[in-house]
C-alpha cells in the first residue's frame, strides 16, 4: 500500500503529484517550519511550486502555460464530442453522455499536461 500524506490538497499518495495526480518524479517538499508536516512529491518543479503555494496560503495558482494549452485542447475536443451528439445544452445529456464528456475532458487534459511536462521536465 502506498504511503499517504494528508495535505491541504487532501489525502494524496506520496508517489502521486498533488496537482495533476500523475506519478511523482522525486521533486519533494516538507515544510521545515512545521513539526510533523507531511511530505509530498510532485511530477515537476512547476507543480511542486504550485503545491507549496497552496500548502502555505490555501490559494490555488492560475494554470501554467502548458495547463492552459491542455485546457484549450480539451475544450476543442469537448466541443467536437457535443457536436457529434447533436447537443449543446448540457442539461439534456444522458448520464452516459455526461460521463463520456467528463472522461474525454479529463483524459485529454491529463495526456496533454503529461506530454508537455515530459517535454519540458528539466527547467535548466
Image: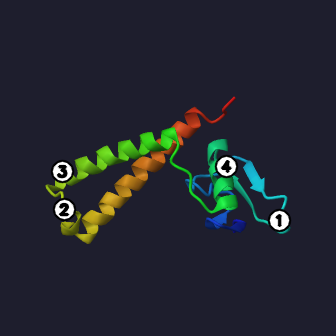
Viewer-nearest of labels 2 and 3?
2
Mark on residue 83? 3
- x and y, in percent, of residue 41 in the image: 70, 54
Question: Counting other residues with Cα less than 10 Å from the Cα at mark 1, is it few (<14), some (14-19), or many (20 or more)?
Answer: few
Determine the CA span between mark 4 and mark 1: 18 Å
In this image, 113 relative to 74: left or right? right
Q: Which of the two discs, 1 and 2, sits closer to the camera? A: 1
- Drawn side of residue 116 relative to residue 8, left or right: left
Q: Secondary structure at mark 3?
A: helix
Q: Nearer the viewer, residue 66 or 24?
A: 66
Residue pointed to by mark 2: 89
Q: Choose the circle earlier in sequence order: 3 or 4.
A: 4
* Residue under the image location 76 percent in, 54 percent down: 29
First of labels 1, 3 by sequence position: 1
State whether residue 15 is above or below residue 123: below
Name the residue: 68% across, 57% down: 15
Distance from disc 1 to disc 2, alpha carbons, whole Å, reads 48 Å
Badge 4 or badge 1: first in the primary sequence: 1
Residue 60 location, x and y as percent?
56, 56
* Residue 67 numbered tag: none
Q: Quadrant of residue 45?
A: top right
Residue at image mark 1: 34
Q: Residues within 10 Å of mark 4 (few under 14, many from 20)?
A: many
Q: Which mark is residue 48?
A: 4
**Cα–Cα gap, marks 2 and 4:** 37 Å
Q: Is residue 46 above or below residue 87?
A: above
Amino acid at each position: 500500500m502506498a504511503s499517504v500524506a494528508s495535505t491541504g490538497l487532501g489525502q494524496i499518495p506520496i508517489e502521486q503529484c498533488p496537482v495533476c495526480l500523475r506519478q511523482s518524479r522525486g521533486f519533494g517538499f516538507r515544510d521545515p517550519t512545521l513539526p510533523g508536516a507531511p511530505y509530498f512529491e510532485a511530477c515537476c518543479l512547476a507543480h511542486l511550486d504550485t503545491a507549496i503555494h497552496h500548502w502555505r496560503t490555501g490559494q490555488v495558482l492560475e494554470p501554467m502555460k502548458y495547463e492552459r494549452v491542455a485546457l484549450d485542447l480539451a475544450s476543442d475536443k469537448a466541443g467536437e464530442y457535443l457536436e457529434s451528439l447533436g447537443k449543446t445544452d448540457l442539461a439534456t445529456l444522458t448520464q452516459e453522455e455526461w460521463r463520456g464528456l467528463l472522461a474525454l475532458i479529463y483524459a485529454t487534459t491529463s495526456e496533454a499536461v503529461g506530454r508537455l511536462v515530459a517535454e519540458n521536465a528539466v527547467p535548466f
